[in-house]
Image (cartoon, rainbow, N blue to C red):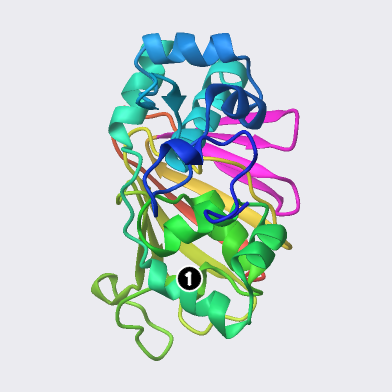
Amino acid sequence: MTTTVPHPHAAAAAEPPGAAVRYRIGEVARRVGVSASALRLWERQGLVRPARSSGRYRLYSEADLARLRRVRRMRQEERVNAPGIRHILAAAPVGEQAVDGRQLRALRGERGLSLAEASRRSGLSASLISGIERAAVGTSVSALQRLTAAYGTTLLDLFAGHKPRGRLVRPKQRAVLEVAGSEVRIEQLAVGATQLEPQLFVLKAGATSDGAYAHDGEEFLFLLSGALTVWLGASERYRLSEGDALSFPSTLPHRWRNEASGETRLLWINTPPTF
């Protein structure tokens, strides 16, 4: 669905011309996969604050939907209580973005893809993709991986900064990508490697992949400091502490969250470079 062709249940008619599509509570409940009463409860608990129409109907944005899906995961799958969710969301504000959306728009344009086709390939809504490109909404590691995969590339194409030549990469020479309001910092540790992709992940308190993603290859994690929970597939869950290592096939849908009260740092290696 694009911003110009709203879903029949969307409340776009209540918005001024040119405004982003807004959704009423019934449509949001269907999209998020919870009841309308749960949405009202989460609002009372301060987990979401939808706008209101002139007739006092709740109106939810794409950013609200992304936030609510995250709340549902934390509440139903990770068993985090409301105060804990508020703390995590406060540590990771929705709507901030360090990735340059123009790069993503250029990648899509180079491949001749419309927003509708990019949506079909990535599984993300066309309006969300448009918002990321315009820096109107925040993004996440999961969304970026799904978008770059849909464009036939990897997150490597989004790295900014000077890329040194040769085999040696000094700390100040690393290419860096910051995601989700700088709560996730990814530093590239190798240049020109063709069989592996070593990266340093620096995660602020509450940082999360904000969804699962999968791709070809294998992965290896070594936790340098902090604490991290990793979910693999539908049933595997691992809590990593300093010095722990984890390996798994990248084809398993995986997501993660920083469990430390402060920063978590880890070495993350993908082989081949498909992330």
Q: Nearer the viewer, residue 59 or 146?
A: 59
Q: In the figure, 179 relative to 88: above or below?
A: below
Q: How many marks overall?
A: 1
Q: Residue at x 55, y 50 (%)?
A: 142
* Residue 175 spot, x, y in % from top left: 35, 73
Q: Amino acid at mark 1?
A: Leu
Q: Nearer the viewer, residue 66 or 74?
A: 66
**In this figure, which residue is indicated by the disc labeled 1?**
104
Q: Is residue 216 magenta?
A: no
Element assignment for label 1: helix
Q: Residue furthest bottom?
A: 165
Q: Residue at x 33, y 73 (%)?
A: 174
Q: In the figure, 203 relative to 152: above or below?
A: above
Q: Is residue 45 left or right of residue 256?
A: left
* Residue 33 spot, x, y in % from top left: 66, 25
Q: Which residues are magenta?
A: 227-256
Q: Residue furthest left?
A: 172
Q: Nearer the viewer, residue 124 or 261?
A: 124
Q: Is residue 69 left or right of residue 47?
A: right
Q: Residue at x 61, y 81 (%)?
A: 194
Q: Nearer the viewer, residue 130 or 143?
A: 130
